[in-house]
């Protein structure tokens, strides 16, 4: 979570954080009203955070239109605050919202945009996550050969970051895709790589790296 200023409504933040942690959408919405009020002492980046958390809750509740709107608001506030990392998170979240609805072209455009933004601003973690998400979309489209390549690229990127746990997850996804293609040896190699990374402590573990 972003650092709060002393003038921020601490009680509203506490209620909001607790509601988000518990997945209580109604309570989160109520607390968010005061945090999103322009007269409040919140910054654009803090408002971006609030919108992004709401988007995730809407997505979990399958309230798609509201999730999409919240993603757009999060991106707008992030850009206003000059926070490319938060903008990238909002774009990536929008991709996930579209993907769950089966709107794969829109999801892929979001992940591609998130990856491009990450490259421009040197956000390696976001770039690896976006590449992994594009691999998932390719697999869902039946473009399994392309997804195998992207999974490998994402896994190697996470390894370079020292994110061994995340790399293991991606290697496992690659192994499953190779298996669907009938590439038994490639599947076994990817699975071995995933198992070799299990239990290795990651040097970075931000919340919700995946999305």
Image (cartoon, grey):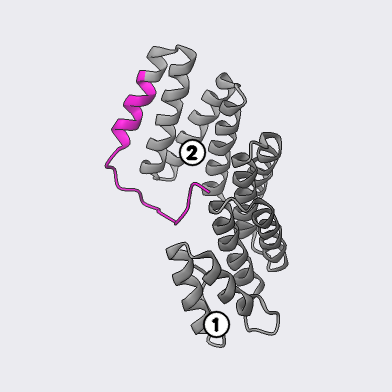
Q: Which residue is mark 2?
A: 157
Mark whose residue sits in front, 2 or 1: 1
Q: Is residue 47 magenta?
A: no
Q: How many marks?
A: 2
Q: Nearer the viewer, residue 198 or 179?
A: 179
Question: Sequence order check: which comes first, mark 2 or mark 1?
Answer: 1
Establish if 141 lies above or below 185.
below
Q: Residue at x 38, y 13 (%)?
A: 185
Residue 33 % position (x, y): 63, 76
Establish if 100 lies above or below 3.
above
Q: Residue at x 64, y 63 (%)?
A: 83
Q: Is residue 166 left or right of residue 45?
A: left
Q: Residue at x 40, y 45 (%)?
A: 163
Q: Is residue 208 magenta?
A: yes
Where disc 1 sits, the SS reads loop
Marking on residue 5:
1
Label 2: how many Cα within 10 Å (few below 14, some 14–19, many 20+): many
Where disc 2 sits, the SS reads helix
Residue 14 % position (x, y): 46, 77
Q: Which residues are magenta?
A: 188-211
């Amino acid at each position: 979570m972003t650092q709060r200023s002393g003038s921020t409504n601490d009680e509203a933040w506490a209620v909001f954080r607790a509601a988000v942690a518990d997945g209580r959408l109604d309570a989160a919405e109520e607390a968010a009203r005061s945090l999103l009020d322009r007269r409040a002492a919140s910054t654009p980046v803090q408002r971006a955070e609030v919108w992004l958390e709401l988007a995730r809750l809407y997505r979990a509740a399958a309230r798609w239109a509201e999730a999409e709107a919240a993603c757009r608001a999060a991106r707008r506030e992030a850009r206003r605050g000059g926070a490319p990392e938060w903008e990238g998170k909002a774009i990536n979240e929008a991709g996930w919202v579209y993907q769950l609805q089966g709107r794969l072209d829109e999801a892929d455009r979001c992940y591609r945009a998130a990856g491009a933004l990450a490259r421009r601003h040197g956000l390696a973690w976001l770039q690896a996550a976006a590449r992994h998400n594009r691999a998932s979309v390719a697999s869902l489209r039946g473009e399994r050969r392309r997804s195998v390549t992207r999974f490998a690229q994402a896994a190697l990127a996470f390894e370079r970051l020292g994110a061994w746990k995340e790399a293991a997850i991606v290697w496992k996804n690659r192994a499953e895709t190779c298996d669907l293609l009938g590439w038994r040896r490639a599947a076994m190699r990817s699975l071995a790589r995933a198992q070799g990374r299990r239990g290795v402590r990651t040097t970075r573990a931000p919340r919700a790296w995946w999305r």
